[in-house]
Image: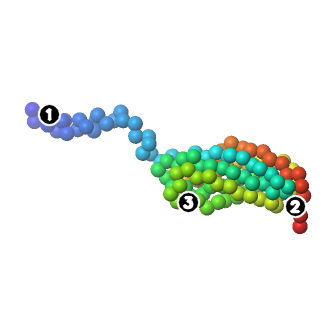
Amino acid sequence: MKYIFPLLLLLPLFASCGEDRSGEQPFAPEVRTLEATVSGAQAVLRGAVLSSPNSHLLECGFAYGNDTLRLSVAADSARYEFEAQTDTLRPGRYFAVAYAKNGVGTSYADTVAFEITEEVEP
């Protein structure tokens, strides 16, 4: 009988083992590339961070070619749409991908393609 009481105290611990606690764990952010629009020699890239579970966003932006457009982020954003523009690209076809970084890791979205047809004016 003296062993039953300590076992009863441990019963709630064992009963909670099957509980889904995945919502409490931090994960890398979920990010999406929305679009790339081109006007002359200027490209505007849009993306969105869909979630950053239990970890604050540190950085987001776009990677294209050998360049990266880094953007500052709001510390308490749960869903954050962002955009960046560049007007220094030469004519040609480019590929860009949105990314987001939090305390757990960096995530990349799908790649979008866009084409610059006009020359950059000096």
Q: How far apart are the two marked residues, 2 and 3, measured between alpha carbons?
A: 32 Å
Q: Amino acid at mark 2?
A: Val
Query: Given this view, does label 3 or label 1 mark the residue nearer the observer?
Result: 3
Of residues 68 and 45, the one nearer the viewer is 45
- In the displayed structure image, the side of residue 2 where residue 63 appears, left or right: right
Residue 103, above or below 5: below
Q: Secondary structure at mark 2?
A: loop
Give coordinates of residue 118: x percent, y percent: 89, 55
Query: Given this view, does label 1 or label 2 mark the residue nearer the observer?
Result: 2
Q: Which residue is mark 3?
A: 74
Q: Amino acid at mark 3?
A: Ala
Q: How far apart are the two marked residues, 3 and 1, measured between alpha carbons?
A: 53 Å
Give the quarter of the figure containing the C terminus. bottom right
Q: Amino acid at mark 1?
A: Ile
Q: Which residue is mark 1?
A: 4
Crowd class of label 1 (few under 14; some 14 to 19; many from 20; radius 10 Å): few
Residue at horizontal 88 percent and vertical 51 percent from the top: 117
Locate residue 111: give its quadrant: top right
Residue at horizontal 16 percent and vertical 38 percent from the top: 6
Instruction: Please indicate, yes or no, whether residue 107 appears anywhere in the rendered image.
Output: no
Image label count: 3
Locate residue 4: give its quadrant: top left
Q: Earlier in the sequence, mark 3 or mark 1?
A: 1
Give the quarter of the figure containing the N terminus. top left
Q: Which residue is mark 2?
A: 120
The colouring scheme, among rainbow, by chain, secondary structure or one colour, is rainbow
Q: Earlier in the sequence, mark 1 or mark 2?
A: 1
Give coordinates of residue 43: x percent, y percent: 78, 54
Instruction: Please indicate, yes or no, whether residue 14 appears anywhere in the rendered image.
Output: yes
Q: Secondary structure at mark 1?
A: helix
Locate residue 112: give its quadrant: top right
